[in-house]
Structure formats: C-alpha cells, structure tokens
Image (cartoon, grey):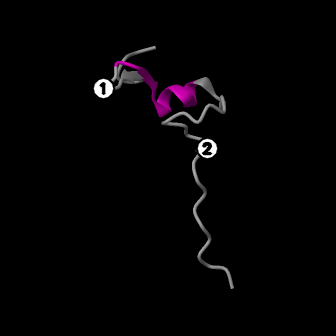
Amino acid sequence: MEQGIDYYFNEDGLMVFTEAYHLKRGHCCKNKCRHCPWKYGKPKPKDTNKK
C-alpha cells in the first residue's frame, strides 16, 4: 500500500482508504466506506421521470 494512492490520513489522524484501494481489493466490505466505488450505503438518486 502506498500513502496518497491507496490511503491518506484525515484531519483527525485516521487512515482513510481511497477508491483506488477498494478497486484493487476487488469487492465491497459493506462498511459504508467514504470512497466506496460500489456506492454501498449511499442514498440512491430519486427517479424524477415517473408518470
């Protein structure tokens, strides 16, 4: 793992994994990660085209 590519430290000093790290990992851990490329736990956009 490489700092700045796979992870960084936030203002509280906690390690945060990047989207690149998650993609290398290859699957979702379902922990609602900040940079989840699979958007797990993120609100789904509302469909405005309903009739």
Q: Does the residue at mark 1 contact the one at mark 2 (Cβ under 8 Å)?
A: no
23 left or right, relative to 17: right
Relative to 36, residue 49 above or below: below
Residue at (35, 26) in percent of width and height: 10
Residue at (60, 24) in percent of width and height: 25
Relative to 5, residue 36 above or below: below
Question: As rendered, which of 9 and 25 lies closer to the eye?
Answer: 9
32 left or right, relative to 34: right
Residue at (60, 67) in percent of width and height: 46
Q: Amino acid at mark 1?
A: Glu
Q: Which residues are magenta?
A: 13-24
Residue 41 quadrant: top right
Residue at (61, 57) in percent of width and height: 44
- Per the image, label 2 sits on a secondary structure element best described as loop
Residue 5 quadrant: top left
- Characterize the local packing of mark 2: few (<14), some (14-19) or many (20 or more) Cα atoms within 10 angstroms: few
**Badge number at residue 11:** 1
Q: Amino acid at mark 2?
A: Gly
Question: What's the distance in space between the residues labelled 1 and 2, CA to CA?
Answer: 23 Å
Residue closest to the far top? 1
**Badge number at residue 41:** 2
Q: Was residue 14 drawn as part of the magenta stretch in this picture?
A: yes
7 left or right, relative to 48: left
Residue closest to the far bottom? 51
* Residue 33 percent coordinates (x, y): 54, 33
Relative to 38, residue 2 above or below: above
Total numbered badges shown on the rendered structure: 2
Residue closest to the far right? 51
Answer yes or no: is residue 30 visible. yes
Answer yes or no: is residue 6 visible. no
